Amino acid sequence: MTLKKKDFVEIEFTGKTADGEIFDSNIEEDLKKINPNLNLPVKAKPLILCLGEGMFLKPIEDFLIGKPDTPASYEIKLSPKEAFGERNKELIQIVPLRIFQQNNLNPVPKAMFNLDGKIAKVLAVSGGRVIVDFNNPLAGKNVIYKIKVLRKIEDINEKIKALISFFFKKEIEFKLEGKKLVLKIEKPMVEYAKLFKETFKNILDLDLEIKEEKEEKEISRKE
């Protein structure tokens, strides 16, 4: 049997540039190499993703579709166009120093900041001007991914947990009632959660019902 679109697989991976610099991984040994100067606990765990649904780089997902659904290891080389794009000179811009000062930021060359939701690398500081690069740090680079497929996921609860983790970046209480999936969501996230009704229906053929977590607690107290 081969892997198909919408199949869930559990993988280990490491991404590195063509010159061997590791930039992403979910393997503890490789994660420590990304920033060996930081003496912080490393949390590494396999990744569960749904193929063809944009949960990983598209070329990687496309590569895995059609491969055997049994454990296997692959090395996939990607060009800049396939990976993080070519460098764009228009994304190198001049930002007034006061913008950084207003946000209590001290721009120095090579420093990375989040400006209006975009990652910016400081190239130079001159007078009241800061030259920043909004290109992805990996733009223009050939990259190599080592992918190890551990298993194909069949359990519906594991699939649900994987989607919840991907969309909400946290664990959320849920209950499966036939073809209905009930999520207990905190009030600030209710409207956001509703955006994924079509996604859960499309991927898992489940009707998503959102229940505000606060309301559930209030009902319990009244009882």
Image: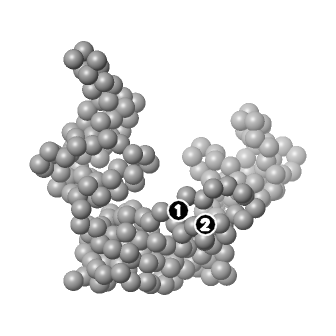
Q: Quadrant of residue 5?
A: bottom left
Left or right: residue 1 versus residue 96 is: left
Disc 2, SS: helix
* Quadrant occupied by the C terminus: top left
What's the residue type where badge 1 is placed?
Ala
Q: Quadrant of residue 160?
A: bottom left
Classify 10 Å Cα crowding around label 2: few (below 14), some (14-19), many (20 and above): some
Q: Nearer the viewer, residue 162 or 58?
A: 162
Q: Secondary structure at mark 1?
A: loop
Quadrant of the image containing the N terminus: bottom left
Judged left or right of residue 162, residue 126 is: right
Q: Is residue 121 above or below residue 190?
A: below
Location of residue 147 in the rendering, given as x and y in whole percent from the top left corner:
46, 77
- Model colouring: one colour
Marks 1 & 2, CB-CB < 8 Å contact? yes
Question: Is 78 or 134 nearer to us in this picture?
Answer: 78
Which class describes the residues within 10 Å of circle 1: few (<14), some (14-19), or many (20+)? some
Residue 139 makes an appearance in the image: no
**Residue indicated by mark 2:** 31
For the point 77% across and 58% down, which residue is it? 110
Q: Residue 145, how many percent across, how many down?
A: 51, 78
Q: Position of residue 95 (x, y in %)?
A: 73, 47
**Dot 2 amino acid type:** Leu
Q: Circle 1 sits on which residue?
A: 44
